[in-house]
């Protein structure tokens, strides 16, 4: 039996996916969490085989939660779920050890297939993500400038777009205010922007925007 921890900040989504997965004979949802913080604690307590992680959540968010979970236990299989299939986030998640990335609009059969694949130690990407990753960097592909950001810089961008202050970001990322500011001005330089307003405009232009702002 494959044990699954389901992480999503929307109760209706959690309830619906939990019911669907529990109808699959070799899968059991052993716990649910509504934030990245809860997910980190639940993994330590429940030790699931697979974590089905919503990427776009308030608080530390899904990306930071994945990083902390894999730092504590790199044996856990994580499947990232998001409404955003482009931008740098899929690449960043795969780089830190997430094995699968699927769209939030994926049918339950694809979700089940992804769970079984990661249990075999294999990667699984939905077609939209696979295509976007395949075409990144090709001439004429209009690659997003956000793709050059490091994992931590991408996390800081996500928090800026959520309207978080430096103090809030430092608490969420467990970094000093000075370190967060260093990442902030480093990503400004990489993206050739001068302030948060220009950053938001660039994020909108390239479709790199958290669903909390939509």
Image: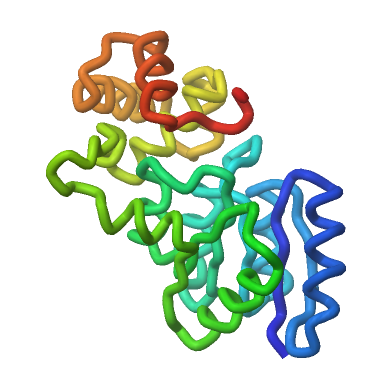
Q: Residue at x 35, y 11 (%)?
A: 198
Residue 11, image x and y in percent? 84, 48
Q: Residue at x 55, y 65 (%)?
A: 79
- The reply, left or right, for residue 89 in relation to residue 116 is left
Residue 2, image x and y in percent? 69, 85
Q: Quadrant of residue 39?
A: bottom right
Q: Residue at x 45, y 84 (%)?
A: 121
Q: Quadrant of residue 16?
A: bottom right
The image shows residue 143, relative to residue 37, as above or below, that is above
The image shows residue 184, relative to residue 21, as above or below, that is above
Query: How many discs mark residues in the rendered view?
Result: 0
The image shows residue 54, relative to residue 210, as above or below, that is below
Q: Nearer the viewer, residue 186 or 2?
A: 2
Q: Residue at x 36, y 43 (%)?
A: 88
- The reply, left or right, for residue 7 in relation to residue 148 is right
Residue 67, image x and y in percent? 46, 55
Q: Quadrant of residue 211?
A: top right
Q: Residue furthest front?
A: 140
Q: How is the image coloured?
A: rainbow
Quarter of the image with the N terminus in it: bottom right
């Amino acid at each position: 039996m494959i044990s699954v921890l389901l992480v999503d900040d929307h109760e209706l989504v959690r309830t619906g996916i939990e019911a669907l997965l529990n109808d699959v004979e070799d899968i059991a949802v052993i716990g649910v969490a509504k934030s990245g913080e809860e997910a980190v604690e639940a993994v330590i307590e429940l030790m699931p085989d697979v974590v089905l992680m919503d990427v776009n959540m308030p608080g530390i968010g899904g990306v930071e939660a994945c990083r902390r979970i894999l730092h504590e236990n790199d044996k856990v299989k994580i499947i990232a779920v998001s409404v955003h299939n482009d931008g740098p986030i899929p690449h960043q998640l795969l780089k830190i050890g997430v094995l699968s990335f699927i769209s939030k609009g994926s049918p339950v059969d694809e979700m089940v297939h992804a769970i079984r694949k990661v249990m075999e130690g294999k990667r699984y990407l939905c077609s939209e993500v696979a295509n976007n990753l395949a075409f990144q960097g090709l001439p004429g592909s209009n690659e997003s400038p956000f793709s050059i950001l490091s994992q931590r810089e991408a996390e800081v961008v996500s928090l800026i777009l959520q309207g978080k202050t430096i103090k809030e970001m430092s608490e969420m990322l467990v970094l000093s205010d000075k370190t967060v500011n260093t990442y902030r001005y480093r990503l400004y330089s990489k993206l050739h922007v001068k302030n948060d307003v220009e950053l938001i405009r660039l994020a909108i232009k390239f479709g790199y925007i958290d669903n909390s702002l939509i």
